[in-house]
Image (cartoon, rainbow, N blue to C red):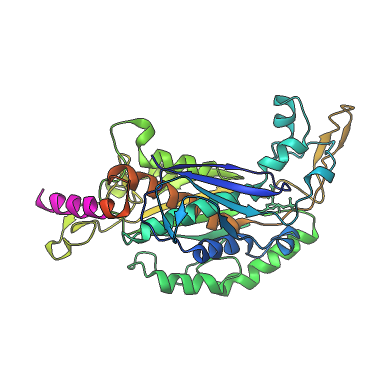
Amino acid sequence: MLGYRTAGESHGPTLIAVVDGFPAGVPIDVASINAELARRQGGYGRGGRQRIESDTVEIQSGIWHGETIGSPIALVVTNRDAKLESLNDLPCPRPGHGDLSGAIRFLGSIRGVLERASARETAARVAAGALAAQLLGHFGITAFGYVVELGGEVIRPKIDPDLEFDRNAWAALRDQSIIYSLNPDQDEAIQRRIDRTAKAGDTLGGIVEARVDGLPIGLGTHAQWDQKLDGRIAQAVMAVQAIKGVEIGLGFEAARRLGSQVHDPIHYNRALQNRPSLGYERPTNHAGGLEAGMTNGQPLVVRAAKKPISTLRHPLASINLNTKEPEQASYERSDICAVPAASVIVENVIAFEIARAFVERYAGDSLAEMKARYALSLEMARAR
Ligand code: EPS
């Protein structure tokens, strides 16, 4: 089974992801993992830390002559701002962070909790996701994330999302935007909003969306709750730091509509039977590509709500954990807005979950065997 764990503190020496169960025979391009790590560091609204770091991955196991060999793959990102031993504890827990709950639970310091709770850990998750995306590339599957709302400002995308997905065109547009949205024309207004917020000592959240294109029908299963792909995706996305809500397709809006306005009619177009969707077309995609925990051949569409960063320069009320006296929450250098970074993280954690389902469904020991099983499965499904 494909999976990964991460290790590492925000100001410790390294962040590590160990990816287990990755198929053999996949050529790995380190530069494209690094490109995702660089994107994660960017976006308007980041704090001083990103001027210190320039995240790159070192692959320390599981690769031989540039290809995976079926062994665990250790991905290591070195922290330049590694200073954990010289850092003091914080006395006053920050509302919204794990400070209070963690210090009480582990009977220890706030520092010991915040170092691991920090979103810096997502560098390891992005490295693992970007590795998984390379496997998906062999099957024509792409995950793509972008910002749809920031600080309450809704982005009006310059590309019609119902038109056929063209990764290059979408990426070219997203790369022009300082907040990774699909409308760089709105950047200026959003930049002003972020600057105003920074000046006020406050922070901003937002909503990101990720879509996955090129999916076959029937990834995931209806048969067991912990193997339903919608559940796995929701867990992976919800477990990203500061995410407070996840929607698939229409999401909460589906609850407000009649059934006839929610479910996507099924059409068949024989001319498209060689696509992964086998010619089963849906004029709408309210389901966001998932029905009963299985992909239905339509693009997967997931949205995630990110709360504003909880470290505030103008802090909220808190207490001193040692004296129990009221005091303002502690402050440490942080970001004003990391919503663009969240779009990169969400894209990559979803890519990993899709790869996991793929490896389960198509005999994941080697890329060659997966390709053969995938082709056979499409052929048999067409005959069905
Ligand atoms: C982050 C690095 C951190 C923070 C941020 C994410 O660096 P530092 O704490 O040294 O400034 O900028 O952490 C948080 C958002 C958080 O909640 O802790 C990164 O690389 O993503």
Task: Please count the marks in the image.
Answer: 0
Q: In the figure, is residue 49 to the left or right of 157? A: right
Quadrant of the frame with the N terminus? top left
Q: Which quarter of the picture shows residue 106?
A: top right
- Quadrant of residue 113 within the rendered picture: top right
Does the magenta portion include 374? yes
Q: Is residue 182 magenta?
A: no
Across and down, in percent, residue 323 comes to 90, 27
Horizontal arrangement in the rendering, residue 256 relative to residue 341 (left or right): left
Q: Nearer the viewer, residue 123 or 304?
A: 123
**Quadrant in the picture for residue 57:** bottom right
> Where residue 305 appears, x then y in whole percent?
55, 49
Q: Nearer the viewer, residue 290 or 345?
A: 345
Seen at 54% across and 41% down, the residue is 239
Q: Residue at x 74, y 26 (%)?
A: 104
Residue 99, position in %: x, y?
A: 73, 35
**Residue range highlighted in magenta:** 371-384
